[in-house]
Image (cartoon, coloured by chain):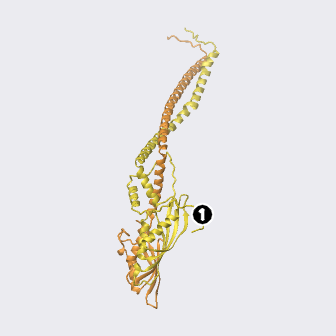
Chain colours: A yellow, B orange
Amino acid sequence: MDLNTGIKKPRVQKAFLVGTVFPLALLLGTVLLFFFVLYPKYKELPQKRDDIVKLKQKADALEGKIKKLNDLVDFKDVLQENSDLLDAAMPSQAEVPILLTQVQLIATEAGLNIKNLSYSSSSDSGEKSGEVNVLLSADGNFNQVTAFISSVEKAARLIDISTIRLTAIEENKTDELATGKLEISLGLKSPYFFVESKATTEDAITIDLNNSDFAAFMNRLKELRIYKTTVDTTNIGKENPFSK
Amino acid sequence: MPESQIDLIPAEEKLQRSKDKAKKAGVVVTLIMFLLVLAGSVGISFYLRSIDGELAVANQNVEDKKKRIGDRAEIEIRARNLDSKYNYLTDIFKNRLYYSILLSELSKRVPSNAHISTIDSSEPETLNLSGDSTDYVALAKLLNALASSEYASPSATANPQQNLFSSVTINTVTLDPNDSRAKFNLVITVDTERLKK
């Protein structure tokens, strides 16, 4: 008969350390590592991956922009020519005297006898844009009015007709509308637009000089007649400003 | 008869041994968990470091490109100015009304025995027309001609069914007793879409 003598000696403090404190410390370490290292870093991952993707996309977009800018540098003259055409059609400022000179020239060329040509107002539709309103009163016949309006429509600086009033002055029943004398009153308006763009590295440049619509529009502008008025700087300064 | 074993271990001792076994198992499990979490933490830290490196390279790449774009700021501003003006002007041209079309279309429709004395348009959609005609029949002729697209030039309307003058209304008609002429005043509604090119 065997006697089970596996009676252990009373457990010492070491056993308590190994059996209880050590696993608790491990558990605590695991929890701390999980909540302070693993989980926060895991949470960072998608954001960082997303950041990389975004940066790569941004780099691609910027590369596209660099390519576009290089193309524009190659077509610098075309860019300047187109800018000049647009400036002729739509000046940056009201430029009232030049507008009045243009209207006067067109009216004279059309054969109208100008009675009054006055600048009435400028309406600002925004910080950058506005309209110059001009009132033209003249005498002439129907053909001359038609010629005037056609020339205005073909002038490079954009002038629109806002009001139109034609009144027969004389008894022209026999002459019909074409030859009878008319009293002409036309309201004209000419827009202007001030642009001051900024170089914003991250925004794409949308203009495409090779775009067919853009080219067609520029060709349309080229067909318009530019009435050049030079404002020189000679003969400035007068001893008596009241003398004629 | 089989040899029988006499278990002299007390019940408390057995319980204690079970507890010891459970504790050992607990130590192993917590150790494995700790090692797993440690390995995961180390691994993810290295991975994040490599991603940070990639990010730094990508950032540098973007900054280099921005600098290259910045060197071409002048041409960019010119291109943007051109773009803004182009967009603004295309809108204006799209909606621009060509009154030369209106006058041309109007003159084609006035019969020889009618006479226009005033054309007045303070609103693009409305045209006031006054004049006189030899008789009412001549006025009717004028009204028919205004209302018909038959006289329209190809430039004024692409669709023959559409007329520049969408409606013609007689405002007043009076017979002048002195010369027996019919004096009229008409209000014409203009389809401004037909005045655009």
Residue at the spot 46% in from the left edge and 89% down from the top edge = B176
B113 shown above or below A97: below
Q: Nearer the viewer, residue A214 or B50?
A: A214
User: Is A9 placed left or right of A73 in the picture?
Assistant: right
A167 lies above or below A222: below
In front of the other: A221 or A16: A221
Taking the image as shown, residue B159 lies to the left or right of residue A235, namely left
The quarter of the picture where the N terminus of chain A appears is: top right
Percent position (x, y) of residue B70? 49, 43
Q: What percent of the width, then of the height, locates residue A221?
A: 41, 60
Marker count (numbered): 1
Looking at the image, residue A242 lies above or below residue B52: below
Furthest residue toward top: A1
Residue furthest to the front: A239
Q: Position of residue A137 (x, y in %)?
A: 50, 74
Q: Quadrant of the C terminus of chain A?
A: bottom right
**Residue B167 placement: quadrant:** bottom left
Q: Which residue is mark 1?
A: A239
Q: Amino acid at mark 1?
A: Glu
Quadrant for residue A13, please give it. Answer: top right
The front one of B1 and A185 is A185
Front residue of this view, candidates B163 and A132: A132
| Mark 1 surroundings: few (<14), some (14-19) or many (≥20) residues within 10 A | few
